[in-house]
Image (cartoon, grey):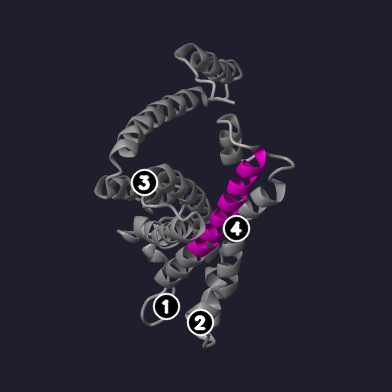
Amino acid sequence: MSLIKLGPWDLSLAASLVLLLALMSWRLRLGVEWRLLIAAARSTVQLVLLGLVLKVLFELESLPWIATLALFMLTVAGWEVMARQKRRYRGPWGMGIGTLSMFISSFSITLLALIVVIRVEPWYQPQYLIPLLGMLLGNTMTGIAIALDSLTRHACEGRGRIEAQLVLGADWDIAIAEIRRDALRSGLIPIVNAMATAGIVSLPGMMTGQILAGSPPMEAAKYQLMIMFLITAGTGLGSVAAVWIGSRRLFDERQRLRLDRLR
């Protein structure tokens, strides 16, 4: 079965539903109509531009240009992690912790998938690399943002308990161990729930896209399983790295709690 192409009129019909929702927000005085419209406009511009860029990359298959796009995606994801924090780290650490964690997790797992699992030749084919990296970055970003936010929030709330353990002679990693475990659990909950409900409550995005594009359902299910496992591993690895780096940053060389490093 061939893919049914969508025209401007088809997209306009779908967009009218968003306009209807914005109108309902205005009538009900929810105050989110402009945020909704701006988000819709941003997604439209971003996805159209991405489509144009990917069209060129698919034709060129140039590693430097693909690497430039990948690094741009990583930078934006790092910024989003920082923007979602209620208590942010000061200086370059605010963006650096999330960016470094996603680089360690998402890039390594994407390379593993391309070279070992899918065995793409060459490994940097944008048709495979960019979608895989995008899905890993997007989901890892959410997990890391939740984990870091939980870490800093509970560290501020439990300052007295942490400092009491330090006074009694505990090392910094022991004093913050329980908070660190809670932060990691918080970061993993979304992807664990997504895996548990996949195929029953929800039909995941990649599987849906492949089925709409005409792929056999079983082949689409195999690819979706692979993606779910990769995302889970990436989220876990990224959250562990971010929470460890973030918790170490909360203490100085003399193992004193330094909440002034947050803003």
Residue type, mark 1 in image: Arg
Helix, strand or loop status at disc 2: helix
Determine whether, in the image, residue 195 is placed left or right of residue 148. right
Mark 1 crowdedness (10 Å alpha carbons): few <14, some 14-19, many ≥20: some
Q: Position of residue 141 (x, y in %)?
A: 47, 51
- Quadrant, the N terminus: top right
**In contact (CB < 8 Å): disc 2 and disc 1:** yes
| Mark before the other along the chain sequence, 2 or 1 | 2
Closer to the camera: disc 3 or disc 1? 3
Residue sitting nearer the eye, 237 or 28: 237
Mark 4 crowdedness (10 Å alpha carbons): few <14, some 14-19, many ≥20: many
Whether residue 59 is situated above or below residue 262 in the rendered picture: above
Q: Is residue 88 magenta?
A: no
Residue sitting nearer the eye, 147 or 42: 42
| Residue on which the image places disc 1 | 256
| Residue on which the image places disc 3 | 73
Disc on res. 188: 4
